[in-house]
């Protein structure tokens, strides 16, 4: 969820509202500037910085995650600022703004500036004039842009990565993520969500504390984002989320020990129309390869979800290779644990769910904008089919937000919600336990 | 309450402030809201969310007697400035200090012959939403009619 204040929440909950957007740019040219969609003074905003009301309402930046493959799309935000009297032209012509921090905020008339909520914190990627040269587009990317770098050198000695100068990396997925982002990419600690990563590794969560299965010996250059997604995140059932404050964070497809807590309730009073349905592909076969010796994998393991295969007579095979998974560090049990969790969600055996996990595309009111990618939300809709019973209507069904597409310009939101299969399950549920490789369930 | 005549003040590039006094009053002087809004109706139909970008105020009026050799040249120079995007101050009543920062909403200027040397034209001004902007169109009307309250 986007961090908001009670004052902001009160304004956002109103059925009639006039959102005020602000784009602030701060960076290496030594000063900052704020462009807003409204005259803040005229609309009773207090405590505001210097601003120019030249911003057009932006479309917003989307974020999509692919849980099964551990990948996240890179968000791009395009803000159009009217070139009033050539002032924007002068600014960009006399300063280097690319690489600056661009923050998009939203507030309402009568709020204090500190009550404005941060929607996106991105990096200015390029600035281009519009067709008629009457305004400029500030095109901004999220911080994953920095992960697109290729790492050539050993972060500890600055020498080229090679067989004679390997970078040894050991730890949990979150620890390795931090090593790559902080040491190899040189991001600051404030640019990653360390608190969440610490939680993921905590013993109370029981998710990764019991395993530190990765040990890499990196001897050649690699692109950080692709490497993280294929070597670490996919193999751990994790994915990246870029938070509103710009921080890179991690989420796990396995719910927290306390159970998934919906942060927002979608109901027929804030949803527009009826959600469109799709299904996540059924995944009931997983093939793992690990114990990489620098040229080939020394071990493989296959997990089959027998119940799913016997039910659906089909399925999708997931192939996972990680150069860092090592047998002596628990790769077999780690692979089994991840496979079990994946099967529980994506093999079509979650309680009551028949077929692949429901994937809903849902349009909703502007007031739902605090909902963020990776959030757990509940859905109550009397007109939606309940596939667990065959009846009409669902109540408090728990979903995970896997796609967030704002349309601030038209005052609407769109989300993709993936059924967790956790509805009605006790806290710390593990989506049921199955003996892998057999058809027995216990 | 006394109806007055409006006035336009603008500053052309390279020149000083220029005033266009209205010799005759405008006809069909109508300020109005032109809201940019987006409506969301909930599935239940119990909630209608209106997201407003802005409630802009526009002013439309007609000038039926622009005289070719007296008032027309002033309006012509003003239109050349305003059609190019220049901002100006519009006083709904020149006897009052109230003015609004405006731009021209029209993208062209047609005049229609009424009588020898007399031509008519319509105008649409957009009041910029700054600190001088009135709260609603009735304020513009009240000033137009000389009401200061």
Image: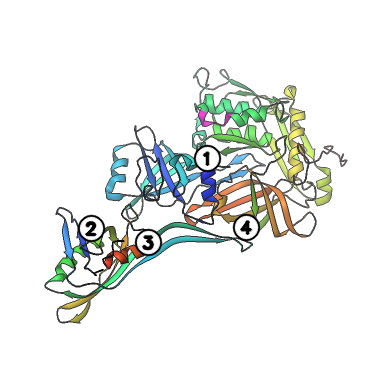
Q: Are marks 3 and 2 on the same chain?
A: yes
Measured in 3D between alpha carbons, the distance from the residue under mark 3 to the one under mark 4, in whole angstroms, is 31 Å
Measured in 3D between alpha carbons, the distance from the residue under mark 1 to the one under mark 4, in whole angstroms, is 26 Å
Where is mark 4, residue-wise? A269
- The crowding category of the residue bearing disc 3, from other C-alpha atoms within 10 Å (few below 14, some 14 to 19, many at least 20), is some
Badge nearest the viewer, 3 or 4: 3
- The crowding category of the residue bearing disc 4, from other C-alpha atoms within 10 Å (few below 14, some 14 to 19, many at least 20), is some
Q: Are marks 3 and 1 on the same chain?
A: no
Q: Nearer the viewer, residue B68 or A224?
A: B68
At 17% from the left and 70% from the top, the residue drawn is: B23
> Regarding mark 2 in the picture, which secondary structure is present there?
loop
Where is mark 1, residue-wise? A244
Give me the chain letter of mark 4. A
Q: Nearer the viewer, residue A127 or B22?
A: B22
Checking the image for residue B97, the label placed there is: 2
Measured in 3D between alpha carbons, the distance from the residue under mark 3 to the one under mark 2, in whole angstroms, is 18 Å
> Regarding mark 4 in the picture, which secondary structure is present there?
loop
Q: Which residues are magenta?
A: A190-194
Residue A237 % position (x, y):
68, 37
Asked whether residue B105 appears in the rendered view, the answer is: no
Q: Nearer the viewer, residue A278 or B122?
A: B122
Relative to B1, residue A341 above or below: above
Task: Tell whether label 4 touches label 2 (CB within 8 Å).
Answer: no
Q: Nearer the viewer, residue A130 or A369?
A: A369
Measured in 3D between alpha carbons, the distance from the residue under mark 1 to the one under mark 2, in whole angstroms, is 46 Å
Q: Is residue B113 left or right of residue A152?
A: left
Where is mark 3, residue-wise? B136
Q: Quadrant of residue A97?
A: top left
Badge nearest the viewer, 1 or 2: 2
Task: Tell whether label 2 touches label 3 (CB within 8 Å).
Answer: no
Measured in 3D between alpha carbons, the distance from the residue under mark 3 to the one under mark 1, in whole angstroms, is 36 Å
The quadrant the N terminus of chain A occupies is top right
């Amino acid at each position: 969820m986007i961090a908001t204040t009670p004052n902001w929440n009160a304004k956002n909950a109103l059925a009639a509202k006039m959102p005020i957007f602000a784009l602030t740019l701060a960076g290496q040219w030594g000063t900052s500037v704020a462009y807003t969609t409204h005259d803040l003074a005229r609309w009773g905003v207090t405590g505001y910085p210097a601003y120019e009301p030249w911003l057009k309402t932006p479309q917003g930046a989307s974020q999509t995650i692919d849980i099964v493959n551990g990948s996240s799309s890179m968000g791009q935000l395009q803000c159009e600022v009217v070139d009033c009297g050539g002032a924007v032209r002068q600014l960009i012509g006399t300063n280097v703004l690319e690489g600056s921090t661009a923050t998009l905020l939203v507030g309402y008339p009568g709020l204090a500036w500190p009550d404005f909520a941060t929607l996106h914190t991105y990096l200015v990627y390029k600035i281009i004039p519009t067709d008629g040269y009457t305004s400029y587009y500030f095109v901004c990317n999220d911080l994953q842009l920095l992960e697109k770098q290729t790492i050539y050198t050993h972060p500890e000695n600055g020498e080229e990565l090679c067989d004679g100068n390997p970078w040894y990396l050991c730890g949990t997925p979150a620890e390795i993520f931090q090593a790559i982002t902080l040491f190899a990419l040189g991001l600051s600690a404030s640019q990653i969500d360390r608190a969440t990563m610490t939680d993921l590794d905590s013993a109370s969560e029981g998710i990764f504390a019991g395993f530190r299965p990765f040990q890499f010996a990196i001897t050649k250059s690699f692109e950080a984002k692709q490497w993280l997604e294929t070597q670490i995140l996919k193999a751990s059932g994790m994915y990246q989320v870029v938070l509103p404050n710009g921080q890179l964070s991690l989420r796990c497809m396995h719910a927290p020990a306390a159970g998934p807590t919906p942060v927002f309730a979608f109901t027929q009073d804030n949803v527009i129309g009826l959600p469109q349905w799709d299904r996540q592909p059924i995944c009931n076969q997983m093939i793992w390869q690990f114990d990489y010796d620098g040229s080939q994998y020394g071990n493989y393991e296959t997990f089959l979800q027998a119940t799913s295969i016997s039910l659906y007579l089909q399925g999708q095979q997931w192939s996972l290779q990680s150069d860092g998974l090592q047998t002596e560090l628990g790769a077999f049990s780690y692979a089994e644990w991840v496979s079990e969790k994946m099967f529980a969600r994506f093999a079509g055996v979650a309680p009551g769910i028949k077929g692949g996990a429901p994937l809903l595309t849902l349009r909703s009111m502007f007031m739902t904008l605090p909902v963020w990618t990776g959030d757990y939300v509940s859905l109550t809709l009397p007109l939606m089919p309940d596939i667990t019973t065959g009846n009409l209507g669902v109540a408090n069904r728990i979903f995970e937000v896997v796609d967030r597409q704002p349309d601030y310009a038209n005052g609407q939101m769109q989300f993709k919600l993936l059924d967790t299969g956790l509805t009605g399950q006790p806290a710390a549920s593990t989506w049921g336990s199955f003996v892998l490789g057999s058809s027995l369930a216990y | 309450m006394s109806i007055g005549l409006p006035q336009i003040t603008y500053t052309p590039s390279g020149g000083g402030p220029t005033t266009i006094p209205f010799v005759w009053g405008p006809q069909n002087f109508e300020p109005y809201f032109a809201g940019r809004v987006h409506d969301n109706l909930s599935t239940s139909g119990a909630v209608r969310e209106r997201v407003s970008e802005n409630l802009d105020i526009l002013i439309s009026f007609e000038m039926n007697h622009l005289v070719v050799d007296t008032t027309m040249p002033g309006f012509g120079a003003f239109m050349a400035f305003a059609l190019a995007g220049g901002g100006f101050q519009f006083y709904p009543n020149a006897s009052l200090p109230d003015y609004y920062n405006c731009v021209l909403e029209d993208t062209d200027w047609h005049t229609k012959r009424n009588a020898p040397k007399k031509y008519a034209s319509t105008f649409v001004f957009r009041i910029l939403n700054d600190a001088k902007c009135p709260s609603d169109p009735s304020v513009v009307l009240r000033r137009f009619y000389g009401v200061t309250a």
